[in-house]
Image: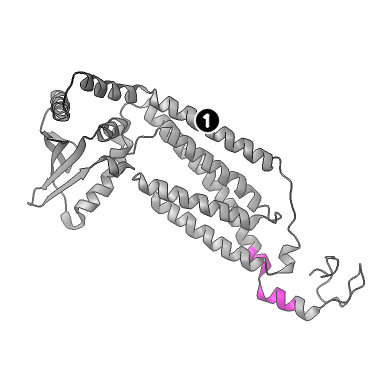
Amino acid sequence: MNCKNCNNLVPENAKFCNKCGKPIDIEKSKTSSSSVDVEKIRKSLKNTGNSVYAIGWITIIINIGIYLWSVLDKNFAESGLPASDLSGTFLMVVAASIFIILGNRIRGLVDKNIKLYLQILLGLSLLLLIWVLSTGGRVGILFFLVVAYLISSLVKIRKAMKSEEFTSTLTSTKYKLDKKGWIIFALAAVLLFFVAVGIDLSSPSYQETNDNLSQVSNDNYSKADLINEIVREIKAEMVLPSQLDEVTKLVDISAQPDAIRYHYVLSVDTSSLSNAYLKNFLISDICGNADTKNLLDYGINMEYSYTVDTGERYFITFTKADCF
């Protein structure tokens, strides 16, 4: 325990401080120590720091890996993963970098700003959770777990702060990345983000889709004419009906007044199927595909009609609003 007058470390049963000579309030010290298991909390917080640090690196590796895969592999769409653009990947890398930096500081267990770091990470995790869910990402549940984990750690740090034995070990540690460094980091991140957006907008797939839409607009095509043309081109490139996998067969593609409609036949157990389930299952692929999203932005909806071989029918529609 520590002397409350000079903060000198003294033996557990000492009655006087061997540095300043002041009497030690033994009962108060025992009460403080017995109410909070400091060593257990320190171990828990160190584990939290290690976990946050690891989450940061894993997030960077996965996001960069998926982006490179989507760029280098022309058959990436067949993987079932949502397409990844450079700007979205960059934002995830920036967020993950903050996890790495703060996770490294938390696991040191000497910085008096540990509580603040946990609060920043919690707020960042909530923003990522909202972003992932709003874009139809399927890994949103993982961010729920991260948020719950950080809340648990905040509760533990609040308990630890009640113990003088713990707070006496905390210092105002100086880091290479100080306040000025964070400002430079933020400005660089904003600048590079706009560069990434520019690269995305100049990508061949984005330009090709927009060139097609512009050409149609210049030729005074109506939306219905454009839909008919797209459906005609799709049908010209494939043979229908087409068995997509063991349970899914694409039997037709039809032009609607304001939508392209895909007709499927399913051979599955329908106990877990519903319109909501199918829409949630498809939304990340729809909104993650640059060509499809451009059509949605132009006002062309995507419709999916499913007929199960036992007679059940399901129908879902995607509009521009679904991808915001």
Looking at the image, how many numbered discs can be counted on the residues? 1
Q: Is residue 132 magenta?
A: no
Task: Give the side of residue 279 with respect to residue 191, left or right.
Answer: left
Left or right placement of residue 192 versus residue 27 in this view: left
Q: Which of the colour schemes (rainbow, by chain, secondary structure, one colour) is used?
A: one colour
Q: Name the secondary structure under disc 1.
A: helix
Q: Position of residue 149 (x, y in %)?
A: 51, 59
Q: Is residue 138 visible?
A: no
Q: Nearer the viewer, residue 119 or 43?
A: 119
Q: Which residues are magenta?
A: 30-41
Q: Residue at x 72, y 63 (%)?
A: 167
Q: Is residue 67 above or below residue 154?
A: above
Which is nearer the eye, 102 or 180?
A: 180
Mark 1: which amino acid?
A: Leu
Q: Looking at the image, can residue 145 be seen?
A: yes
Compared to residue 11, the image places residue 131 above or below, namely above
Label 1: few (<14), some (14–19) or many (≥20) C-alpha neighbours in 10 Å: some
Task: Please determine whether, in this image, residue 227 is positioned above or below residue 118.
Answer: above
Q: Quadrant of residue 109?
A: bottom right
Residue 317 drawn at (x, y percent): 20, 44
Which residue is identified by label 1?
A: 192
Magenta stretch: helix, strand or loop mostly: helix
Q: Looking at the picture, how far across and down is residue 129, in whole percent?
A: 43, 50
